[in-house]
Amino acid sequence: MFIGQYFQKVDEKNRIIIPSKFRNELSFGAIITLGYDKCLSIYTQEEWVKLQNKLLELSENKSDYRRHVRAIASSATECSVDSHGRVLIPSTLLNTIGISKDVVMVGNLDHVEIWSKEAWIEYYSKSVESFDELSERFEK
């Protein structure tokens, strides 16, 4: 399980240090791809398979489905944590979501998200402001 938020920097070679609390689960290989809300998502191999299976259950007859799956699959790339705890992020992914230097790595239970610092602060502030209202919507 991935939880917490960690402020990091992208180095000159497009590498980010993975927080030590995330490293063990990601050290067996991971997949990085576009995430929702203008972030990147890193999945363990196991969670990636679960996501693939969910996507494969959707109707391929719908153009929105095809567009969505193509965006996720075509941007996905395998990554690994190096001996210094870093992972290389393809520049195409960084450019797509507007990350240049400062990032926040966010644990989102079954995966890790990478946000530009500015985007995360704005998103998180809005989420905190509406926290009670949102929680009422999702009660069973």
Image: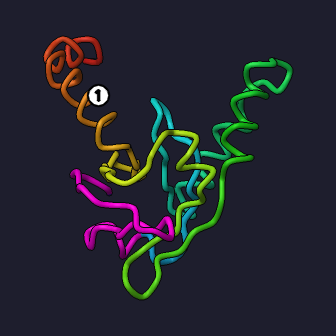
Residue drawn at point x = 69 percent, y = 30 percent? 68
Dot 1 amino acid type: Tyr
Q: Where is residue 14 in the image (x, y as percent from the top left)?
A: 49, 65
Pick the residue in front: 37 or 100: 100
Pick the residue in front: 105 or 56: 105
Q: Which residue lies furthest to the front in this view?
A: 12
Residue drawn at point x = 66 percent, y = 41 percent? 72
Q: From the viewer's perspective, is residue 121 above or below residue 48?
A: above
Q: From the viewer's perspective, is residue 84 above or below residue 88?
A: below
Taking the image as shown, residue 41 lies to the left or right of residue 66, namely: left
Q: Position of residue 96 (x, y in %)?
A: 58, 40
> From the image, which quarter does the N terminus lie in?
bottom left
Residue at which label 1 appears: 123
Element at label 1 = helix
Residue drawn at point x = 29 percent, y = 43 percent? 117
Residue range in magenta is 2-25
Taking the image as shown, residue 107 lies to the left or right of residue 96, namely: left
Q: Position of residue 47 (x, y in %)?
A: 53, 55
Q: Where is residue 81 in the image (x, y as percent from the top left)?
A: 47, 76
The picture quadrant where one finds residue 57 is: top right
Residue 9 inside the magenta-drawn segment: yes
Residue 4 inside the magenta-drawn segment: yes
Pick the residue in front: 122 or 51: 122
Taking the image as shown, residue 82 lies to the left or right of residue 75, namely: left
